[in-house]
Amino acid sequence: MFAIQKPEVGRNIFMITVEIFGKKYLVPADLTVAAAIEYAGQKPIDRCGNGVCGSCLVAYRLKNDGRTRYCLACRQKAEDGMSIISSPSYEFSKNGYKLDEIANVNLRNAVGDIYPEIYSCVGCGLCAKACPQGINVKKYVEYVKNGEYEKCLEESFSCVTCGACKNVCPKKIRSPEAALLARRICGKYLSPKSESLEKAISSVKNGEAGRELENLTKKPLADIKRLYEMRKAEK
């Protein structure tokens, strides 16, 4: 549970009116949407607190504007006259796949085989307008359809799988999942192999990483900082 953002004691507080799930409340003007919901006594929404897990998606409207928008409640600041409509959750599909077995099929068609609904995209662009991360979802769906997974990786890298794009999609395309699989394929099959990564994975499997971590926790903070500064980055 995250603590509600409380105003500083002794400071004049400017209050704003926010409608939350059909009821109007007065809340401090400097709260995020997530904190405003809690301040009003409503059930807290699931969240990481930083807007990176995608769980805090909310739909809202602004004063004198009928357009439904989406935001990550951890990040978005509450505004006077804002109407918070709902807190939709994204449920992953049951489209099971094993990444190790994808190598046995045509990689460039793999995502389309598992998520064939991407081919029903009508190019309306509602997904891109809804994305709270500002991602051009329409563009990366096109990349996936063409098997251009490297371009999809670049375009969709900041996706947090909040599901705003699917909520507004007339074809209910699971764009976040398709992009996630495309990025996984890039990482496992299309990107250059990283010797340091392979070594790190091996050390985790054989227990060496656990012993190194235990030794690291016993070192003074100054030594840890020095080791970090002296680390060798793989180019």
Image (tube, rainbow, N blue to C red):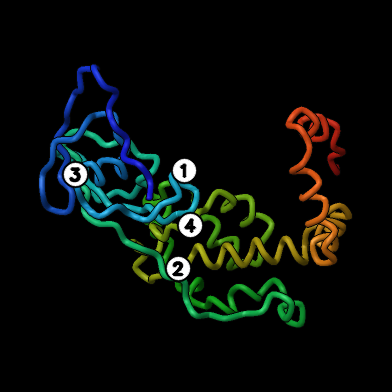
Q: Which tag, 4 or 2, sits closer to the chain's start?
A: 2
The amino acid type of the residue labelled 2 equals Cys
**Residue 5 is drawn in which quadrant?**
top left
Q: Nearer the observer, disc 3 or disc 2?
A: 3
Residue located at (75% from left, 65% from top): 188
N-term mark: 3 or 4:
3
Residue located beneath label 2 in the image: 121
- Mark 3 or 1, nearer chain start: 3
Would you call the spot at circle 3 few (<14 residues within 10 Å), some (14-19), or many (20 or more)?
some
Q: Amino acid at mark 1?
A: Asn
Cβ–Cβ under 8 Å for marks 2 and 1:
no
Around disc 1, counting alpha carbons within 10 Å, would you say few (fewer than 14), some (14 to 19), or many (20 or more)?
Answer: few
Determine whether, in the image, residue 35 is placed left or right of residue 54.
left
Residue marked by disc 1? 50
Q: Position of residue 134 (x, y in %)?
A: 46, 45
| Residue 123 at x, y percent in the picture | 43, 61
